[in-house]
Image: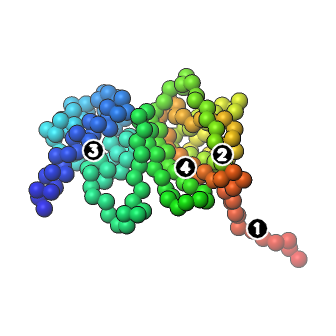
């Protein structure tokens, strides 16, 4: 058991370094975002120091992954529903939340801090999208509209309209995207109010 634990902890350093270099973040920038000193981060990545839970929590938040993923914990539960995050080269992470064919598909996106002057790469495809921002600030370019959505705000649109999502210099952003087929929309229901008094 101790040998397994040792092997798991020894593998954390290279995984941390890979996540940081993939996102093109310096140790100094990571230190500023996590509150962990750059020298400690360097020792963690080199395997000269073992991480504590207090160190893993802010690192997982910055990288948009779970602690299980940081330490390479084995999957648990039903492997058919063990949906793994997909890391992109730009430092963003997409977590599929559904896996059923057809119907509305749900995805959680985590985007690292962006640049306000980034030129959007507008795309179109068949479908309908509903977006909800969990944390941070999301830039949504929709046709000729350049919108800023903050935590708790939502947008819905036909994906045949040229669109693009991005983060801002305000920091990372986490948002939910529900994508359905053309003509299929998210239906919001509210509890009925009190009827007319008689």
The one of 190 and 35 positioned closer to us in this rendering? 190
Q: Earlier in the sequence, mark 2 or mark 3?
A: 3
Identify the image quadrant of residue 126: top right
Find out whether the residues at labels 2 and 4 contact each other: C-beta distance under 8 Å: no
CA distance separating discs 3 and 1:
48 Å
- Depicted 84 relative to depicted 117: above or below: below
The one of 156 and 193 positioned closer to us in this rendering? 156
Badge 1 crowding class, 10 Å Cα cut-off, few under 14, some 14 to 19, many 20 or more, is few
CA distance separating discs 2 and 3:
43 Å
Q: Residue at x 69, y 59 (%)?
A: 187
Residue ID for mark 1: 193
The one of 177 and 27 positioned closer to us in this rendering? 177
- Depicted 68 relative to depicted 195: above or below: above
Q: Which one is closest to the eye, mark 3 or mark 4?
A: 4
Q: Is 83 on the left-hand or right-hand side of 7?
A: right
CA distance separating discs 2 and 4:
19 Å
Find out whether the residues at labels 1 and 4 contact each other: C-beta distance under 8 Å: no
Q: Residue at x 31, y 53 (%)?
A: 68
Identify the image quadrant of residue 195: bottom right
Residue ID for mark 4: 176
Residue 32 visible in this rendered orientation of the protein:
no
- Depicted 67 relative to depicted 119: above or below: below
Badge 4 crowding class, 10 Å Cα cut-off, few under 14, some 14 to 19, many 20 or more, is many
| Numbered badge on residue 55 | 3
Give coordinates of residue 13: x percent, y percent.
21, 41
Say which quadrant the C terminus sits in: bottom right
CA distance separating discs 1 and 4:
28 Å
Say which quadrant the N terminus sits in: bottom left
Residue ID for mark 2: 126
Q: Residue at x 37, y 33 (%)?
A: 23
Q: Residue at x 59, y 59 (%)?
A: 102
């Amino acid at each position: 058991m101790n040998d397994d634990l040792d092997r798991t902890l020894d593998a954390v350093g290279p995984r941390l370094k890979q996540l940081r270099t993939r996102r093109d973040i310096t140790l100094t920038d990571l230190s500023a975002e996590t509150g962990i000193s750059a020298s400690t981060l360097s020792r963690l990545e080199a395997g000269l120091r073992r991480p504590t839970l207090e160190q893993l929590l802010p690192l997982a938040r910055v990288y948009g992954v779970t602690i299980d993923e940081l330490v390479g914990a084995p999957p648990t539960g039903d492997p058919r529903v063990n949906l793994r995050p997909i890391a992109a080269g730009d430092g963003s992470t997409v977590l599929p939340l559904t896996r059923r064919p057809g119907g509305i598909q749900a995805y959680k996106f985590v985007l690292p801090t962006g640049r306000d002057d980034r030129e959007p790469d507008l795309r179109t495809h068949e479908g309908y999208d509903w977006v909800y921002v969990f944390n941070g600030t999301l830039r949504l370019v929709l046709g000729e509209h350049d919108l800023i959505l903050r935590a708790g705000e939502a947008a819905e649109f036909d994906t045949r309209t040229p669109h693009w999502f991005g983060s801002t210099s305000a920091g990372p952003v986490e948002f939910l995207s529900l994508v359905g087929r053309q003509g299929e929309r998210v239906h919001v229901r509210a509890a009925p109010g009190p009827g007319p008094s008689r």
